[in-house]
Image: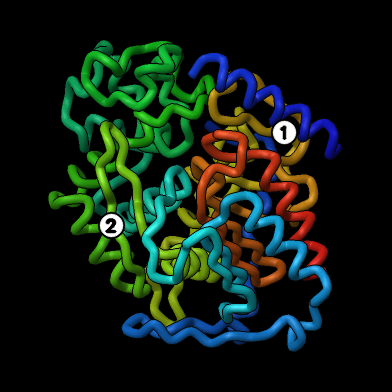
Amino acid sequence: MKNRMTLFYSVLLSLILSCSDGAEEILTEVPNPDQSDLYFPPIDSEAWETTTISDLGWNAAAEQPLLDFLDEKDTKAFIILKNGKIAVEKYFNGGSVSDNNPWYSAGKTLTAFTVGLAQQEGLLDINEPSSTYLGTQWADITTDQEQAITVRNHLTMTTGLDYTNILLQNCTNFDCLTYLNEPGSFWYYHNAAYTLLTDIVAGAVNTDYNTYFDTKLKNKIGMNGAWVSLGYTNIYYSTARSMARFGLLNLNKGTWNTTEILTDQNYFTEMTTTSQNLNPSYGYLWWLNGKSSFRAPAFENEFPGELMPDAPNDLIAGLGKNDQKLYIVPSKNLVIIRMGDDTGQALLGPSSFDNNLWIKINALTN
C-alpha cells in the first residue's frame, strides 16, 4: 500500500510539473467526541492549557524524530491538541506563535462551514441554483445550463464548468466560466468554481463575505487572521493556533464549549462525509480518509485505496498547497496542525507527506 501511494504521488508531481448527487460509498458519520473531556481556550485571551507527552502516556522517544522530520520539511508551525489541550507546539525555520501563515486550500473548510451558517439562518439553500445568489449570466453558458448548477455543486467540485485550460482554472471572469460536463456527472478540483462561493454567500446574506465570516464564525471562537485576495483567489492567513481553534470547533461538531455555532447537524454530517459518488474521499470541501478510492487535484482519474493509509480511518482534513494541514481525528480527540513552506512536492492538497507524517505521529501517540 505504501509503495502504491508513493508511486501515485510521484506520478502526480511529475505531471503537475510538466504542465506548470447521492453517494454510493458508505457514509461514516464523524463520531461524537467525549465532550466532558474537551477543553476550550478562552476567546479573549492567548491562554491555552497544556498537557504533556508523559501525562498522556505517549512514546517520548518518538517525539524528537517527529520534530526533526518536520524541521527538515520546512515546517513553520506544528501543533497537536489532545482533548483540546496543547500536547505539542513547536515552531521551526524562523516561525513563531504570532506568525500569520496562509491556509491555501485548507481554507476551503472555512468556506464550507460559513455556507452552512448561511443556510442555517435560512438565507441560503445549497440545493438552489447558484444564480439565485450570483444573479443571472454569471457564466458564459446557456440559461438552462446555468440553472442546473446548484450551490451544492460548488461545494462538491461537480459544477461541470470547463477546467481543461490550466492557465484559467482560477479565473472567475464571465468568459472563463464555460460548459464542459453536466453538473454532478464529473468531479474535478476546480478552484474557480469554489471561489464563487464567496460571492454566493455575500449575495445570500446581503453583506460583505468577510464581515459575515468575522461575525458568525471567526469572532465567536477567538480566531485571528483575515482573507487576502491574491489574483482571483481568496486565501486565509492566520496563526497556527487559530487554525487549531477551528479544528477544535469541528472536532466538537460546530459547538464551541457550550456555545452552539453550527446547529444544523444534518449539514455538518453532509459536510464531513462522502458528498457524491464520484470521489468518496470528498465531502463539502473537506477531505475524508478511510474510503475505498479518491480523486486528487490536477487529475481526472480515480485512484484505489485510502488517502492516508497510515492515518486513522475517521480522519477529516483541510489540505492546502505547500502541505498546509488541518487534521481532525474524532475517535482520538486529536486536532493536528502543520503550516509552513513546500515540503518538496509542490502539490495543491493531498501528498505523500501526509502519510509519512502520520507514520511519525503514530509512533508518538500510539
| Whole-percent x, y for residue 246 in the image | 45, 65
Q: Which mark is residue 293?
A: 1
Alpha carbon of mark 2 to alpha carbon of mark 1: how far? 34 Å
Going by the numbered disc 2, the residue's amino acid type is Ala
Q: Is residue 142 above or below residue 255?
A: above
Q: Is residue 9 above or below residue 125?
A: above
Q: How is the image coloured?
A: rainbow
Residue corresponding to mark 2: 226
| Whole-percent x, y for residue 323 in the image | 56, 46
Helix, strand or loop at mark 2:
strand
Considering depth in this image, is 266 or 84 the residue closer to the camera? Answer: 84
Residue 66 shows in this picture: yes
| Whole-percent x, y for residue 121 in the image | 28, 59
Left or right, residue 218 beside residue 113: left
Helix, strand or loop at mark 1:
strand
Instruction: Please tell me whether mark 2 or mark 1 is closer to you in this view.
Output: 2
x 60%, y 61%: residue: 328
- For the image shown, how many numbered marks are present on the structure? 2
x 58%, y 85%: residue: 50
Contact, CB < 8 Å: mark 2 with mark 1? no
Mark toward the start of the polypeptide (2 vs 1): 2
Residue 253 shows in this picture: no
Considering depth in this image, is 63 or 178 the residue closer to the camera? Answer: 63
Within-10-Å neighbours for mark 2: few <14, some 14–19, many 20+: some
Left or right, residue 123 beside residue 95: left
